[in-house]
Amino acid sequence: MNVPSNRWWQAERWFTCRDDLRFCKSGAAAMIRSRKLTSGLLLGSFIFVSLYALNTFLSPVVSGTPHAIASNTGRNLREILPSSEPPVATPAAPEATLKQLLGCVDREPTPRYGQRGDFWVLYNYVRAEEQPGCADSITYTTHGDHTFLDNLAPLLERWQGPIAMSVFSPGTDWTQALAAIQHVRNCGRSAHLVRKHVTFHLYFPTKHVPKKVPRPASDGQSHLPLANCSRTLESVAAMSQPTYKTTHKLLYPVNVGRNVAREETLTHFILASDVELYPNPGVIPDFLEMMRAHLTQAANVTTNTTRLPPPPKVYPLSIFEVKENSSMPQNKTQLALMLKNKDAVPFHKHVCPNCHNVPKAAEWMALPQSEGLHVFHVGQRTGRHLHWEPIYIGTRQEPPYDERLSWEGMSDKMTQGYAMCVLNYEFHILDNAFLVHRPGIKYYHKDKERSVFVKRTQVLIKQQILPELKLLYGTRKGCTV
């Protein structure tokens, strides 16, 4: 065989080595006989042929297909050799539970004593019989004194889930509070719901300690007085008589109660609300299903780009009032009819309309009721809504309520609203969830005595609290108290 002296031909045969080792060897021999072959090419050809032969020898062959060693690293013989057994189907990964998606941890309620500034707090003093897991439900957190416990029955009939309530019980109000708690737990058609779902925390000022405070029993209830169901709740709790709080002219520390109830919840999600606001039925299962779907979808989304963490979010509920002696709407369709007939109005329409001016309220009402829950609109506490006081489903991670503020001084939720605005919270308004105030439409009445506390509160906020909030959270254009 005559070997051409053309080096291009030699290179062409050289590259063909990848397909035919015998051709590679003959080509190498031909090039060796060529006088124009350089010593460098000779050395290169020898190394390539050696490596190729070694690779071919070591690579296993299945059905005539060479498999590179690198692709079989860590594989055993059963994986490489053909098998007569049919391949075993890999079961699909089970869908993650809401608990797994949230990454939350179950907690146990523990009776304990604590101090918050000038207040003693008895956490979990009366415990609910049923303790939910962190992703099993939503806890309605609330507050009040013993004269507000009559709201629990209508609230639970609609809510059907856990409630954490802080009860302000200074001095002799302590005795009435325990009597009222036992009555709602043991008397009336909804007593079983109260026992099952409601955990009570009690708190009082250090200067107004009750004369006797029984230590909480291990069962969470035997330290309480016996219930007397032959009497009404009003008579048992002496609701017709002035309270110790009233006679001693104590301010109601509303935000202490809010924070206490919120911090001791067992569930990941909470609805921090006032006890006279009743949700429409079905909010708990519909919201949890919505969140499971949202989190599952988010977990399945893959991206190669780096994304900034999403802004924090909460889920507000629209709020309404209904006329005295009116039945409360069970769903959005009934609510729309009551609004049309003037039997219902937006919350505080005649007291402080801007405080509860929900973004796109008219569009929300015009949207027909649908199955389940969905996010209707994402709003923020800015612009026309900078004084909005939303009540929302969130978590324990939201900024705390300032405990220096009282119910009498008003603006008790405004400082938290400022912090959430600066932190760029998004308010994901729910389409079919709402709250209805205990029947009776409120109207503005000037209260000269209360106006004194309101002025003091405004000075406190402007001169002390707001500078602290700016220091801790910073500032953002459009955010205000």
Image (cartoon, rainbow, N blue to C red):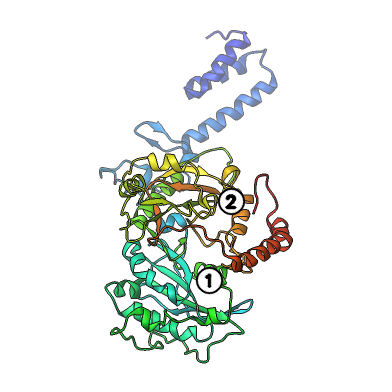
Q: Give the number of the disc on residue 90.
A: none
The residue under the point 61% across, 11% down is 8
Answer whether residue 213 is visible to the viewer in this image. Answer: yes
- Mark toward the viewer: 1 or 2: 2
In space, the residues marked 1 and 2 are separated at their CA atoms by 22 Å
The residue under the point 26% across, 73% down is 189
Q: In the rendered view, does 155 fall on the left or right side of 350? A: left
> Percent position (x, y) of residue 333?
31, 46
Earlier in the chain: of badge 1 and badge 2, it is 1
The residue under the point 66% across, 64% down is 457
Q: Amino acid at mark 2?
A: His
The residue nearer to you, when weighing 341 against 24, is 341
Q: Amino acid at mark 1?
A: Gly
The residue under the point 65% across, 26% down is 43
> Percent position (x, y) of residue 207?
61, 84
Q: Is the residue 182 above or below the residue 298 in the image? A: below
Mark 1, residue position = 257
Q: Is the residue 303 above or below the residue 31 in the image? A: below
> Percent position (x, y) of residue 5?
62, 8
The residue nearer to you, when weighing 191 against 264, is 191
The residue nearer to you, when weighing 56 against 319, is 319
The residue nearer to you, when weighing 82 against 209, is 209
Q: How many marks?
A: 2
Answer whether residue 121 is visible to the viewer in this image. Answer: no
Q: Is the residue 385 above or below the residue 205 in the image? A: above
Mark 2, residue position = 387
Screen quadrant of the C terminus? bottom right
- The answer to whether mark 1 and mark 2 are in CB contact below 8 A is no
Q: Assess disc 1: are there few (<14), some (14-19) or many (≥20) residues with their C-alpha within 10 Å of its C-alpha.
A: many
- Regarding mark 2 in the picture, which secondary structure is present there? loop
Question: From this viewpoint, which residue is outermost toward the bottom?
Answer: 211
